[in-house]
Amino acid sequence: MKHSVLSSVVVLFILSVLTPLGLAQNAGAAKPFSAHDILFSGPELDFFCKYMLDREFVLAPESKVTRWIDNGKIEVDFDRTVRFTNLSVSPGGFSFNVLLSVKQTNYDLDAEGKRILPGQMKNRTLIEKHTFSRSKSTGKIVGRTESICHDIPNTVLSMTRNQILFMEDEDKMVIIEIPDGFIGDYFTTGGKYKPGTAKNRTEIVVKDGKVIRTLTSETFDIDPETMKITPTGGDTTPYIDFTVLETP
């Protein structure tokens, strides 16, 4: 009886020693599971994380000039900052928010281009949501952006747009934005608004140690009765939309 009990104790001791060793060997043979193995990845996301995420961008000094909108009827003093934040990555794609803080004063102009009324302040804060995934047919990143919050009551100062995002080389990202029928509220004279939309081409380039975004925008008027869309004929010359501090 004593011999039997002793034998059982010895067997249990041997198993208690060998089992962890066996598990350790098996664990070493198999690749540990990681959530990163199934999450979305690619050069587009790498570029975004390296150069844009959680940075504050400012309007480029060369773009801090007076602008004209509403077919030259309004002169605008404009400045703003932009921050990309709240990145979320899933197996199907990624999303992030864009926070914009805008300082803007609009001045109505007469036929000779002179300011005729005191400026109307249009300062505002906006939050945009951008969502992307990869197209199986084209290989490009496709998605949409939409305004989810702003602080000017009873207006839609930003609109929903479809987006195509791709890399032209390792230091240049291109984003094409196409409106999908949503009507935005655009500034017009007398402090009022008019319906409109726009399509944009954005190029984000790392150059001379800085991240520079150049924007080309084409705007369209929308007839509120017929909903017909016509080009405004405004200036579509590219301008540097923002720049940022030295890259790491």
Image: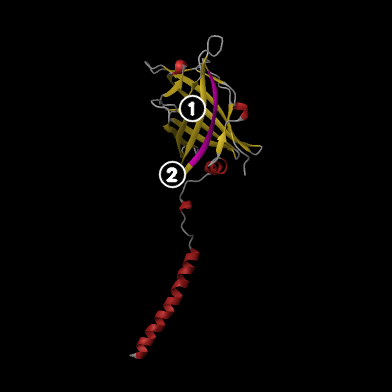
Q: Position of residue 164 (x, y in %)?
A: 49, 33
Q: Work out which quarter of the rendered image holds the C terminus and state it.
A: top right
Image point (53%, 10%), residue name: 110
Q: Secondary structure at mark 1?
A: loop
Q: Nearer the viewer, mark 1 or mark 2?
A: 1
Color scheme of the displayed model: secondary structure
In front: 235, or 156?
156
Q: Residues within 10 Å of mark 1 (few under 14, many from 20)?
A: some
**Rendering quarter of residue 115:** top right
Q: Position of residue 220 (x, y in %)?
A: 47, 20
111 in the magenta segment: no
Does the magenta stretch mainly form a helix, a strand or a loop?
strand
Query: Residue flagged by tag 1: what amino acid is it?
Result: Asn
In the rendered image of this protein, does residue 20 appear above or below residue 61? Answer: below
Mark 1 vs 2, N-terminal side:
2
In front: 130, or 14?
130
Identity of the residue furthest to the top in this view:
111
**Rendering quarter of residue 193:** top left
Q: Position of residue 207 (x, y in %)?
A: 64, 36
Can residue 213 be seen here? no
Q: Residues within 10 Å of mark 2 (few under 14, many from 20)?
A: few
In the rendered image of this protein, does residue 238 appear above or below residue 91? Answer: above
Q: Mark 1 to mark 2: distance in Å?
A: 36 Å
Query: Residue flagged by tag 2: what amino acid is it?
Result: Gly
Q: Secondary structure at mark 2?
A: loop
Image point (57%, 44%), residue name: 50
First to last magenta residue range: 75-85
Read off the residue under disc 1.
123
Read off the residue under disc 2.
92
Q: Are marks 1 and 2 in contact (CB under 8 Å)?
A: no
